[in-house]
Amino acid sequence: MGLVKHSIVSIEGMGTDVAIGYLAVPPTGSGAGVIVLQEWWGLVPHIKSVADWFAEAGYVTVAPDLFDGKQTTAPDEAERLFMTLNIEQAAIKLQQTIEFLKSHEAVTTEKVGIVGFCMGGN
């Protein structure tokens, strides 16, 4: 089997110039779509590895960056990032991520799944 292809992507219409998502495509080049929601630490290596794990299992995954590039390992800072998250903006970002994934050439399904941890699992 081949390697997972991953990259940082910008998702049009999300109101930021920052690259805001981590895309992982399975070795087969296509599959069902899954969104991986971040923990309150931000889009950190652990969440990227979860996206890669799903891609290794055959899914096209996107992990959106709800904190626009901010990340931390300090619980107090993570709580601050979480508490200052604009819920309306986060909902827009998630909707844009769904549309991005559904229209991606590698996604073979009309519906997408979503999995989250910590903050993303609420």
Image: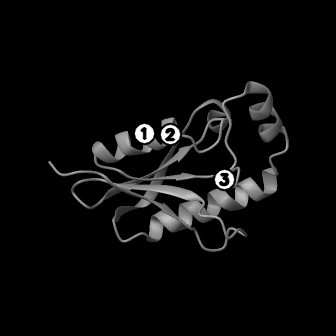
Classify mark 1: residues with Cα within 10 Å, few (<14), some (14-19) or many (20+): few
Q: Earlier in the sequence, mark 3 or mark 1?
A: 1
**Residue 94 figure quarter:** bottom right
Q: State the SS at label 2.
A: helix
Q: State the SS at label 1.
A: helix
Q: Is residue 98 above or below residue 46?
A: below
Q: Earlier in the sequence, mark 3 or mark 2?
A: 2
Q: Amino acid at mark 1?
A: Ser
> What's the mark number on residue 90?
none
Residue at the left extreme, as displayed = 1
The CA span between labels 1 and 2 is 6 Å
Q: Is residue 71 above or below residue 29?
A: above
Q: Are marks 1 and 2 in contact (CB under 8 Å)?
A: yes
> What's the mark number on residue 45?
2
**Residue 122 figure quarter:** top right
The CA span between labels 3 and 2 is 12 Å
For label 3, the residue is 69
Classify mark 3: residues with Cα within 10 Å, few (<14), some (14-19) or many (20+): few
Q: State the SS at label 3.
A: loop
